[in-house]
């Protein structure tokens, strides 16, 4: 019985290797790369040592990532059929190469690098998964990243979706292309922005950081079809079928900004100072993600909002948003709006000068 099962697994593994390499009709299906049927998941708390990662007051990304990664590790110990590892368990400094080398040595089926974001203007919020840019690793990363985004979205985060980076650029997600070069599937999970109030509410205590780690583990359990020692059984859970050769056009990095961003005043209430604007924008490559505005000619922007109808997996959304601003009296406001695409590349609108008497 045991040998038949083992032979079937071996056959399955061979089919998988052939499917990923040659067949265009094959679908990406997660599974153990070796013949033991045990899934190896290497969990990598980003940064460490003098590499603190992002910071906000007493919150350091390296520490937050470690708390989340350890909770993910502990949660996975509750499942059968999986061997989790951690690349670091203390404040050790590791190079990206050392992390990838360890994952390769352990024959990782999945390398999960844990991070928390921050933005230069401290206005962005949400979560995103960075996945391999090339087939067949891309399809595995896409499936896992989709599942993980969904859990984070249900938890309350804005889903920024899935992104790819073909080559290392010195950033937090370098582990993904470096692992891909070794034939390993790595994902870098950017949990919320530690400098954004909306995200901080979901991650500013160790218990909240641990809760995120347990959700990361849940995504792994569902992705690999694991069974919890007491309870949940994801062995028959079906994932969205994705052709192994497929590389999605939309999540691949594009550097160009939205082409059009036009601001028009459409209403004014002189009694209250409320002015209503219409913002028309277009990005032919991808959906529009956020918008914000300035009343000082673009020196400072405020009230970042998610663009209506934004969904990371959709390539396009509504080209128009209407918003109302209360402007100060007896002072000339110079109103400028800004639209962001999925990669946070922005385009500024025309400026409208308004003086409320
Ligand atoms: Zn990071």
Image (cartoon, rainbow, N blue to C red):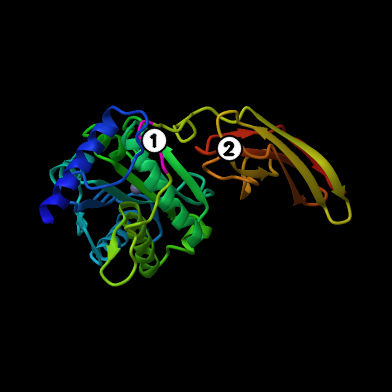
Q: Mark on residue 154?
A: none
Residue sitting at x 47%, y 45%: 161
Instruction: Out of 132 and 209, give the one closest to the viewer.
Output: 132
Crowd tier of the residue under label 1, counting other residues whose Cα lies within 10 Å: few below 14, some 14–19, many 20 or above: many
Compared to residue 31, the image places residue 228 above or below, namely below
Question: Based on the displayed image, in which of its 4 quarters is residue 16 positioned?
Answer: top left
Q: Earlier in the sequence, mark 1 or mark 2?
A: 1
Residue receiving disc 2: 287
Residue sitting at x 30%, y 52%: 224
Q: Position of residue 153 (x, y in %)?
A: 50, 56
Residue receiving disc 1: 243
Start-end of magenta stretch: 241-245
- Whether residue 184 is in magenta: the answer is no
In this view, the residue farthest toward the bottom is: 230
Q: Secondary structure at mark 1?
A: loop
In the image, the residue with mark 2 has its CB under 8 Å from the nearest atom of ligand 1 = no
Q: Quadrant of the N terminus?
A: bottom left
Q: Position of residue 112 (x, y in %)?
A: 29, 49
Q: Position of residue 323 (x, y in %)?
A: 74, 48
Compared to residue 226, the image places residue 288 above or below, namely above
Q: Position of residue 111 (x, y in %)?
A: 26, 47
């Amino acid at each position: 019985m045991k040998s038949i099962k083992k032979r079937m697994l071996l056959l399955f593994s061979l089919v998988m290797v052939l499917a990923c390499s040659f067949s265009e009709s094959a679908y990406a299906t997660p599974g153990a790369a070796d013949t033991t049927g045990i899934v190896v998941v290497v969990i990598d708390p980003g940064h460490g040592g003098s590499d603190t990662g992002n910071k906000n007051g007493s919150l350091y990304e390296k520490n937050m990532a470690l708390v989340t990664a350890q909770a993910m590790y502990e949660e996975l110990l509750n499942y059968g059929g999986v061997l989790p590892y951690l690349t670091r368990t203390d404040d050790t400094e590791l190079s990206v190469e050392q992390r990838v080398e360890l994952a390769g040595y352990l024959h990782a089926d999945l390398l999960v690098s844990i991070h928390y974001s921050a933005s230069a203007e401290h206005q962005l919020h949400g979560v995103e998964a960075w996945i391999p840019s090339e087939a067949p690793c891309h399809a595995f990363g896409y499936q896992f990243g989709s599942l993980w985004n969904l859990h984070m979205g249900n938890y309350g985060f804005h889903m920024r979706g899935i992104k790819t980076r073909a080559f290392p650029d010195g950033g937090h997600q370098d582990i993904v292309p470096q692992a891909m070069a070794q034939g390993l599937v790595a994902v870098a999970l950017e949990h919320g922005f530690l400098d954004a109030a909306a995200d901080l509410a979901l991650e500013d205590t160790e218990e909240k950081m641990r809760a995120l780690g347990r959700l990361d583990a849940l995504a792994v359990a569902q992705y690999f079809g694991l069974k919890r020692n007491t309870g949940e059984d994801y062995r028959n859970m079906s994932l969205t079928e994705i052709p192994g050769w497929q590389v999605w056009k939309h999540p691949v990095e594009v550097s160009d900004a939205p082409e059009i961003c036009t601001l028009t005043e459409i209403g004014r209430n002189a009694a209250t100072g409320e002015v209503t604007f219409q913002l028309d924008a277009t990005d032919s490559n991808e959906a529009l993600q956020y918008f914000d505005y300035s009343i000082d000619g673009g020196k400072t922007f405020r009230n970042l909002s998610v663009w209506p109808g934004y969904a990371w997996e959709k390539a396009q959304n509504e080209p128009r948003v209407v918003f109302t601003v209360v402007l100060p009296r007896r002072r000339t406001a110079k109103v400028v709006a800004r639209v962001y695409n999925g990669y946070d590349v922005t385009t500024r609108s025309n400026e409208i000068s308004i003086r409320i008497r």
